[in-house]
Image (cartoon, helix red, strand yellow):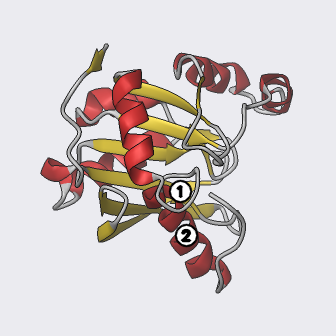
Amino acid sequence: MSSDFHIKREIRILAIDDSALLNKKVMIIGTLFRGGEWMDGVLRSDVTKDGLDATDVICKMIIKSKHHGQIRAVMLDGITYAGFNVVDIEKLYRKTGIPVIVVMRSQPDFEKIKSALKYFPDGEYRWTIIKRAGKIEKITGEKGKSPIYIQKAGISLENVNQIIRLTSIRSNIPEPLRVAHLIATGVVLGESRGKA
């Protein structure tokens, strides 16, 4: 089920990305933005490398935040954090009541993912969560920007398109996710690296 709602220019979005995989516990950073231009806050938590706690940790991060009542959409940089700690986006939506948008730079290679999951005793369970995230949609941004790929829970594709266009002010990646990535890698590595 997805909901349609009016997208305001300063819609409150929480974007979450993880840091480098240096330890068993991996830092995740959430940036709270008004649209794509104004950052209102930063949230931080830790998930287990290759664990199964990402969904619950992100739920708690959202629900315990003083900003919880203002957040209108959650953006995730993919659905796997800290290695293969898979986020169940349907469960995240159900538990928080906030629509979820998963953003990816490229189409995932499901054969490689499935092959890697063979090394996990609960690989089939993780694969089930990945498949439950639903259809991957290609979104073509403004002229000159590369397309991105999304999955969604609790929100229409039309609303996702509006939010992506509103927040992708510097690149094809929404600014809240781009900044979450910069903070997460910069704090852990001493300097930000890579791309969201």
**Location of the C terminus (image quadrant):** bottom right
Type of amino acid under label 1: Asp
Asked whether residue 169 appears in the rendered view, the answer is yes
**147 left or right of 94 in image:** right
Q: Nearer the viewer, residue 55 or 149?
A: 149
**Location of the N terminus (image quadrant):** top left
Dot 2 falls on a residue whose secondary structure is helix
Q: Residue at x 67, y 46 (%)?
A: 50
Q: Which residue extends farthest front?
A: 143
Q: Position of residue 170 (x, y in %)?
A: 53, 62
Q: Circle 2: is it few (<14), some (14-19), or many (20+) Cα within 10 Å?
A: many
Q: Which residue is mark 2?
A: 184
Type of amino acid under label 2: Ala
Q: Which residue extends farthest left?
A: 69
Q: Position of residue 163 (x, y in %)?
A: 37, 41
Q: Position of residue 37 (x, y in %)?
A: 34, 65
Q: Given contact means CB atoms under 8 Å apart, are the residues at marks 2 and 1 in contact? A: yes
Q: Residue at x 16, y 51 (%)?
A: 70
Q: Nearer the viewer, residue 127 or 180?
A: 180
From this view, report whether residue 183 is shown above or below residue 18: below
Q: Residue at x 36, y 36 (%)?
A: 162
Q: Which residue extends farthest top?
A: 1
User: Along the polypeptide, which appears first: circle 2 or circle 1?
Assistant: 1
**143 left or right of 175 in image:** right
Q: Which mark is residue 17?
A: 1
Q: Nearer the viewer, residue 157 or 177?
A: 157
Dot 1 falls on a residue whose secondary structure is strand
From this view, report whether residue 145 is shown above or below residue 6: below
